[in-house]
Image (tube, rainbow, N blue to C red):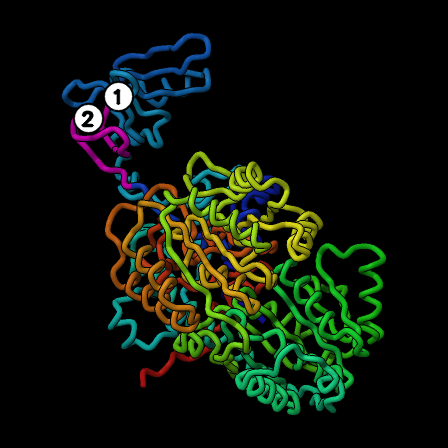
Amino acid sequence: MRPELLNPLFAEIQALKGVGPQLARPLERLGLARAVDVAFHLPSGWIDRRPVDRLDQAEPGQVITIRLTAVDYRQGGMRGPFRVQAADETGDVVSLVYFGGNPGWAKKLLPLGEARIVSGKLESYGQELQIVHPDHVLPPAEAGDLPEREPVYPLSEGLTGKRVAMLVAQALERAPLLPEWIEPSVVAKRGWATWREALARAHAEPGDRLARERLAYDEIFANQLALMLVRASSRKRRGEPLNGDGRLRDALALPYAPTGAQRRAIDEIAGDLQQATPMLRLLQGDVGSGKTLVALMALLIAVEAGAQGALLAPTEILARQHHATISRMLAGLPVTVAILTGREKGKVRESTLMGLADGSIDILIGTHAIFQEAVAYKRLGLAVVDEQHRFGVAQRLMLAQKAERPPHLLVMTATPIPRTLTLTHYGEMDVSRLDEMPPGRQPIETRVLSDARLGEVVDGLARHIADNGQAYWVCPLVEESETSDQAAAEARAAALKLRFGERIGLVHGRMKGPEKDAVMAAFQRGEVAVLVATTVIEVGVDVPNATLMIVEGAERFGLAQLHQLRGRVGRGDKRSICLLLRGNALSETGRARLALMRETNDGFRIAEEAAARRGRAARHPPVGRAPVQAGGCGDAAGVAADGERRCAPAGRSRWRAGGRAGPRRAAGPLSVRTRRRGEPAQVRLIIAIRAPAPRAD
C-alpha cells in the first residue's frame, strides 16, 4: 500500500490545473501519466538570458535580455510580419518581429514611448538586427520575475516549454517533505540538499551538479533496496524443485563439446533448479560464448521435470532467431516449442495460448507478449530472460507471476558487465560467467579506416562478394537528415544497389515485421550478399557465412554497441574482419574508443574500460553553456521494442552527471536507467519513508 503522504504526488496527470483530455495526449507521449512523472521530467538543458545594457554588447545568435523602448511600428504588407522598432539606451535600434497578421497584440505589449524588458534571440537580417517573436516582454517593474537561466524541457507536439514549466511547478508543490533516509554524515560530506530541495533545484538550475548527484544517489540506493526486498520476498516463497532425469539432454546432438565454462554454468543452474528456493541467477557471457546452449539445457531440465519453460527476448528479431535455433537443435526430440510475439494474431495466437494452458507446449519463446494478461501457463517452472539489461524488475516480476508457485529465473546478458557494476546492479543475483569461447572460433580482426577511403572499402566489398562471402554494413541513421551528416542506411543501400544490384538488403526498425523477416531470411539463405542495417541487428542475427562487418560513422557508437555489432561476425570457422569507418572530426575520446576496439576482442576488458571512461567523464565534466537543444544518444541510448537503438525518450535519462544535455556525452556512473513503461513509478519514494538510513560503517 502506498503511504497517504504520497497520494497527491501520484495523482493522475489530469489532477493538475489546466490539464484536460486534449493536453493529456502529448503529455502521455512523453510518458507523463502522473504528477510524479512531471516532477521527474527534468530539463535537458538551459537558456542563459544574458542581460546587456546596449545592443553593441551582444553578438547575433545570442539570447539576450535588454531594456528597450518602442519608437515605431511597421506593417510589412498584407502577409508580411509586423515590426516594432525599439531602441536601447544609446539609441541603437532592433526590430521586434511578429508574424500572424494581428498587430494589436504586439502594440499592447510594446506601447510607443514606454520601456520594456525584452528577452529573445538576437539575429541579423540584412543590415539590421532583429528578435523574432521575443520570448519575454515585461514592464521594468516585473524584470525580477525573469530568470537569467531558463530550463529547456523535452517537448512533444502540442506542448510548449512555458506550459511544461507551469505543470512542473504544480507537481513540485505536491512533493511531500520526506524524512531523510541517507546517513547524515554522507549528506554533510557531499553537501547535498534534501530530496525535495534537490528536485526543485534540478528544475530551477539544470546545471546544478550536486542536485542531480543527490537524486542519482536516491535512485541507486532505492534500486538496491528494491532488489533486496524482491530477493527476500522470493526466498520466503517456496518454489518448485525441478529435478531433470537427463533423458532429453543426453539425446541432444551438440555441434561441439561444451566448454569448461558452459559445463560449470550448467552444473550451477542444475543445482539451483533442484532447490525449493526459486533460482535467481545471472548468466554473463561475451558475444559468441554459448549462452543459448546453456539456456537450452536449463529449459530441458524444466521439461524433463514435467514443467514448462519460457524464454523472453527484447526484440522480435532476437525472439525469432532463438526460436529457429532452438527448434533446429531440438529436431527429433519430443519437445514442443512455440513462439509468441506481437505479430502472432488470430488462430495462430489462440492455438498457442491453448497449448500453454493445457501444457502441450513445453517451451515458449517470445517478446513482452509472453507475459501479457491473456497468457496463462499450466505449469511454468523456469523463465529465461535474454539481454537482461533491457528489462526492469517489474517486467521480471510480471513474468514470475505467471506461475502458481514462483518459477526459477535465469537472466542472461551478452553485454559484459564490469565486476563492480555486477555487484551494484545485480547484487540480488547469483552470477555464472562464461569466459571461454567454443572451439573453432577465430578472433575477429578489427581495422579502423577514414571514411575518405570509402571507395576502397566498396572495392574490397566487391572482392568479398565475388568470393561468395556475405557482409553487414551498419549506419547510424535510418534516413538522411538535414540536421546531421551521419550516414543513413536507406541512402547507403541505394548507393550500393547501383553497383551490386538486388544482392543488397536493407533492415531497420521502421520496417514492418514481415518485411524484416523476408530480408533476414534471404540473407540467411545467401540470396542477399550485403545486409545494410541500423543497430536493429545488434543482437539476434547469426549467419556464419557473414564474415565482414562494416560500421560507418563508428565514432558515433559506444564501446558496448561496437562490440555487439562486431559480434555478428566471427560465428563460424572462417576468418572475419570488422572495418570501423570514422570521420575526420575525431575527438580524443572517440580516437581512444576506436583504438581499444582495434586492440582487443575481450568484451570484459572493453566493459571495464568503458566504465572507467564514464567515471572519468563524470568526475571532469566539460565546461560551457548547455545547448538549447540536445542531440545524439551516446551510450545512454534507449532501445525500442523493434530492437533499434534510439535516443532515450525526451526527459527520461534523468540524472545525467552535470545536468547538461549534449551530443555524444558519455553517461557517468550517475546515469542510471530510466523508468520503463509499465514499471511501478518511483518505488524509491515509497521505500524512502519505510526504510531506515544506511549505516556508514
| Segment colored magenta | 48-69
Nearest to the observer: residue 444 or residue 63: 444
Residue 354 location, x and y as percent? 84, 68
- Does 151 appear in magenta? no
Q: In the drawing, what numbered circle is on residue 423?
A: none
Q: Which residue is mark 2?
A: 55
Amino acid type at circle 2 is: Leu
Q: Does residue 343 appear left or right of residue 1 in this picture?
A: right
Q: Which residue is mark 1?
A: 129
User: Looking at this rendering, what residue extends furthest in the left direction?
Assistant: 90
Residue 40 location, x and y as percent? 45, 56
Q: Are marks 1 and 2 in contact (CB under 8 Å)?
A: yes
Residue 371 versus residue 74 in the image, above or below: below
Amino acid type at circle 1 is: Leu
Residue 183 location, x and y as percent? 33, 77
Q: Could one spot residue 212 in this view of the protein?
A: yes
Residue 571 location, x and y as percent? 56, 67
Residue at horizontal 30 percent and vertical 52 percent from the top: 207
Residue 271 versus residue 84 in the image, above or below: below
- Does 64 appear in magenta? yes
**Mark nearer the viewer, 1 or 2:** 1
